[in-house]
Image (cartoon, rainbow, N blue to C red):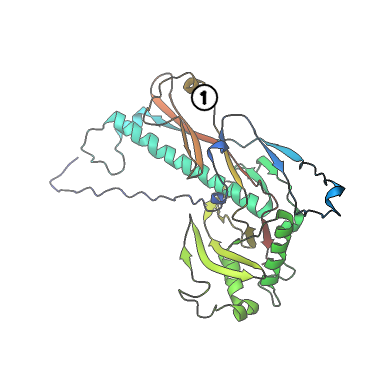
Amino acid sequence: MSDKSTTHMLRAYEQVAAPTMFLSGFFQTPANNFYTSESVEIDIVRGDEDVAVAIQSIGTGYRYNQEDQFTNKKFKPPVYDEAFPIDSFELLKRMPGQNPFQQPDFRADVITKVMRRMMKLEAKIRRAIELQASQVLQTGLATLNDSDGNAVYSIDYKPKATHFPTSAVAWDAAGATPLADLESLAKVIRSDGLTNPDTLVMSDSNFELLLKNEDVQKRFDTVNYTPGSLLASELRGSGGTFQGAIKIGSYRFELWTYNARYKDPQTGVSTAYVTETSVMMLSSGARLDGTFGAIPNIGQAMGMQSLVPELAPRLSSEAMGMDFSTNVWMTNDGRSLMGSVGTRPLMIPTAIDSFGCLNTGI
């Protein structure tokens, strides 16, 4: 009931937790990585650092070589398919920021609600993709749990155990040797992956311990930690903080910290994508594949008109590393609208020997 006072409605404030995609950003997503089949396969040809062997004379003849053999790997991706309802009676209520004395525009409000809820579900799936990438890069496998803690999907890419060592002396203990630990892992990756690792991603805790280490302080200017010094910090990428470059042995690394978090579906606890003990070591030029399968829809395949034509049935972007299948349908009585967003993403460490993760033991 209105009285004689006047009121001005401010623009609504909506707190948005934008998903960060820093780790999944290391996985390439060319057009060939978007598909509609049930599973995905890849042929892998492994080379080695062979050298040509000299022969005694031209008359000796050729030294014959055999073509490198290849292996085939087949993967079936997990499925994410999130849905939401919109009930007709919702349209009688005002939306955030709307004038309470303005007559509702049902069609406009429905489209707004659909887009808002799909964006929310998309953000949930993108965080799940980032979680999958974080598991792969820290362990070489991925295990996806439901809200009860049950594993609904698990895949083991079978990396070499030597790529996931634990420091002999914890980084927070006396006598820690972080530079030697990292150089040792770099040599393993160089030997197995035939590529120089050049990227480090770690937790804030490990970065602080690195700065406090005596060997690091002797070699680098960590006391006068100001812009322009070797470890000068800057923001770069999606959620990662670039802390500068550091040279360890024959290897030069870009050093990043990443403190983004997600809410664990079972415990509801805010959890870091990068565990406190992890230091990931990657080779920026090595191939990692982010792949996406579509969610099939018979109606769309038969050319049925969408209830919300403004919404594309499949949204894919190579640059953003995303692919989503959308659907909108009406219940039989016409009183409720349903919407869904889904995808079948799989983060594949194609160059399995090109990365590793050090457990600092803290």
Q: Is residue 209 above or below residue 265?
A: below
- Residue under circle 1? 297
- Answer with left or right where residue 337 lies relative to residue 232: left
Q: Nearer the viewer, residue 345 or 9?
A: 345
Q: Is residue 190 above or below residue 266?
A: below
Horizontal and vertical percent position of residue 216: 62, 76
Q: Secondary structure at mark 1?
A: loop
| Quadrant assignment, res 343 | top right
Q: Is residue 262 above or below residue 33?
A: below
- Answer with left or right where residue 282 lies relative to residue 58: left
Q: Nearer the viewer, residue 215 or 78?
A: 215
Q: Nearer the viewer, residue 191 or 244?
A: 191
Residue 164 visible in the current orientation = no
Horizontal and vertical percent position of residue 132: 60, 47
Q: Quadrant of the C terminus?
A: bottom right
Q: Is residue 312 above or below residue 3?
A: above
Total numbered badges shown on the rendered structure: 1
Residue 105 visible in the current orientation = yes
Q: Report the amino acid beneath label 1.
A: Asn
Residue at the front extreme of this rendering: 59
Q: Quadrant of the N terminus?
A: top left
Label 1 Cα neighbours within 10 Å, binned few <14 / some 14-19 / many ≥20: few
- Answer with left or right where residue 357 lies relative to residue 21: right
What residue appears at the point 30 percent right and 29 percent down from the top-left corner? 107
Residue at the left extreme of this rendering: 4
Q: Nearer the viewer, residue 101 or 305?
A: 305
Horizontal and vertical percent position of residue 326: 47, 31
Horizontal and vertical percent position of residue 106: 29, 29
